[in-house]
Image: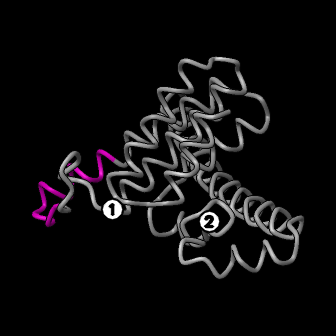
Amino acid sequence: GPADAVGVGDVLLAQCEDKRVELQALLRDALCTTATVKQKLHLASMASDTRQRLIRSTNFKDMPEGIDMQKLVEDSNMRFLLEGDGYAKENKFELAKQMYDAQVIAIRARTQAGISKGRRPALVSRNPQLTGKEIKLLGLCHGRLGKMFLSLSKASRAIVEFDRQLSLGLEIDDPAEIAEAYFGLGT
């Protein structure tokens, strides 16, 4: 009867949810692998002396070429950022924007939850509740949004995002984030 249909429906819905979560995990892994391959290809395309100088730089791990994407995702739950990157690569910019915005909200929500649990805030003036790492991650998100808006020929909106990235980079004195923001502003 109807009660059995609801029971079967509930089981099917639970199975679909499990499958969706599994597929999302596989997608995140694939995106991390793709980002890592892209980083390695970019490094390989550089002149040998330039590549060696870059790798030896004290800021290498903070630069797009040196960020360990798998560690970043595991440590900071940056799944929305990676999903946004995937959508942007497929020219699905509205979905990419939603994912990047969701990542900013997720970072801020985790931060607020951490404060309410008694976590010690960072000693940063503009964002006292954020740690340096969280500010770095916000800078990455705003940089991605800026690049996406440039692709859409929305220069004024791109400038806003790169300016936010620059402000965050300056706040934590992150040369890689500052350089990325200036590059975006100059494009």
**Where, quadrant-wise, is the N terminus in this rendering?**
top right
What kind of element bears circle 2? helix
Q: Residue at x 37, y 39 (%)?
A: 105
Q: Which residues are magenta?
A: 108-121
Is residue 66 positioned above or below 1 on the image? below
Percent across and percent down for residue 148 are 65, 31
The image shows residue 180 at horizontal and vertical percentages of 58, 49
Pick whichever, 30 or 53, lies toward us: 53
Q: Position of residue 60 (x, y in %)?
A: 60, 72
Tell me if mark 1 has few (under 14), some (14-19) or many (20+) residues whose alpha carbon lies within 10 angstroms of its own: many
Vertical placement of residue 151 versus 153, above or below: below
Q: Relative to residue 177, is residue 30 drawn left or right?
A: right
Label 2, on which residue? 69
Specify the amino acid type for callout 1: Gly
Identify the mark nearer the N-term, 1 or 2: 2
Per the picture, the main secondary structure of the magenta-coloured stretch is helix
The amino acid type found where label 2 is placed reads Met
Cα–Cα gap, marks 1 and 2: 18 Å
Instruction: Tell which tag, 1 or 2, sits nearer the viewer.
Output: 1
Q: Residue at x 67, y 44 (%)?
A: 85
Quarter occupied by residue 73: bottom right
- Quadrant in which the C terminus appears: top right
* Residue 116 magenta-highlighted: yes
